[in-house]
Image (tube, helix red, strand yellow):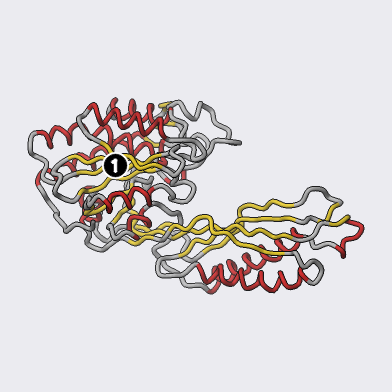
Amino acid sequence: MSDATLELLARLVAFDTTSRNSNLALIEWVRTYLDSLGVASHLTYSDDGSKANLFARVGPPELPVVLLSGHTDVVPVDGQSWSTDPFALAVRDGRAYGRGTADMKGFIACVLAWLPGVVALANSGKLSRPVGIALSYDEEVGCLGVGRLIEDLVARGIGVSGCLIGEPTSMKPVIAHKGIAHYRCVVRGREAHSSLTPRGVNAIEFAARLISHIRKLADAEAQFGHRHALYDVPFATLQTGLVHGGVAANIVPRDCEFVFECRWLPGDRHERFVDSVRDYAVLLEKEMREVAEEASIHFEALVNCPPFEAVEHSEVLQYAHELAGCCRSEGSGVAYTTEAGRFSEAGIPCVVFGPGAIREAHRPNEFVELHQLEACTAWLERLGECLQSGKIVQESFA
């Protein structure tokens, strides 16, 4: 295991880039690191300027890049029981512990440690294909930041031949994943003293009926819906993850809101589920207004990340398979969602492929095994050899 990789990982983990926080300190640190290598970087900011994406390229400027992409944000540690400081790297028993080690600062550290060698090749004129580095914000809360990065690449005419998203896949290619959408439903009823229940409209109870409808849709899909054997959960799923409502046990609650989620397979339409929920809400709203004409049910779209399927025979997919020693038929589909959906939506072929196991992500005592970092480093070295020789050249998908 390279000391440089662990040193870089320790620096990255030390930045608390929980999605609710700014990631600018980490981005500026990476920018300074790249500057020290003679690599210029370009930032694109969130609307309020508190977060940024970073893009940098090494190699011939006129050719499309092979893009290595990772998100800088991590999930919260609140309420989790950690045996060590989650923002201080701890290495023991063949593992590196810390928030983001698996998801996905381990991959970013490997790329940054590998980069000086790539820069040396470029400076000596031996790099025939350029490498791009992309770091994004707010992936964990809906793949929100990377869209701005992609828009900037298109606006500046930067070609991308393919993108490798280094999420934790145990260094095995993930060639497809589901889409994900979150919706907030806000139910407004009428408040009343609980002894006069019929004079009120109980927002929690009407919300519960909607939630029950969502569960029935999910059960029907699990029993009768379309299946795809490639996926670990082979059908579309729905669930309600958040509910808030009421102020006291003896008050008929006026307000209740909940957030529900859909995860769907490529080729499907999650809107069919949402339309069913909306149609049922129309019926409930009529019932509510028989008592309180001001009653209402409103929906708000929060997150919509598209599904992803790898482009067969694409350059980046060949890199993932051939350089990792995988057969071309090897690859899995997963229920979780990545930024591959956003890149694919923009016409950029992708594969999801990186060190660490997804089962360790988001958990207390998150870790990445050192041998996974070593495997990623070895894969990157082989990629460098291909980019040096110009092997596997495809057209640009700018």
Callout 1 amino acid: Phe
Image location of residue 317, percent across then percent down: 25, 55
In which quadrant of the rendered image does the C terminus lie? bottom left
- What's the residue at 78%, 48% (across, down)? 247
Evaluate whether residue 108 shows in this view.
yes
In the shown orientation, is residue 34 left or right of residue 254?
left
Q: Position of residue 15 (x, y in %)?
A: 43, 30
Residue position marked by numbered label 1 in the rendering: 55
Left/right of residue 344 with respect to residue 121 in the rendered view: right
Q: Residue at x 17, y 33 (%)?
A: 117
Residue at 79 percent of width and 55 percent of height: 253
Q: Residue at 83% of width from left, 50% of height from top?
A: 249
As rendered, which of 353 and 326 lies closer to the eye?
Answer: 353
Looking at the rendered image, the quarter that the N terminus falls into is top left
Left or right of residue 338, residue 362 in this image: right
Q: What is the quadrant of residue 348 in the picture? A: bottom left
Q: Quadrant of residue 396?
A: bottom left
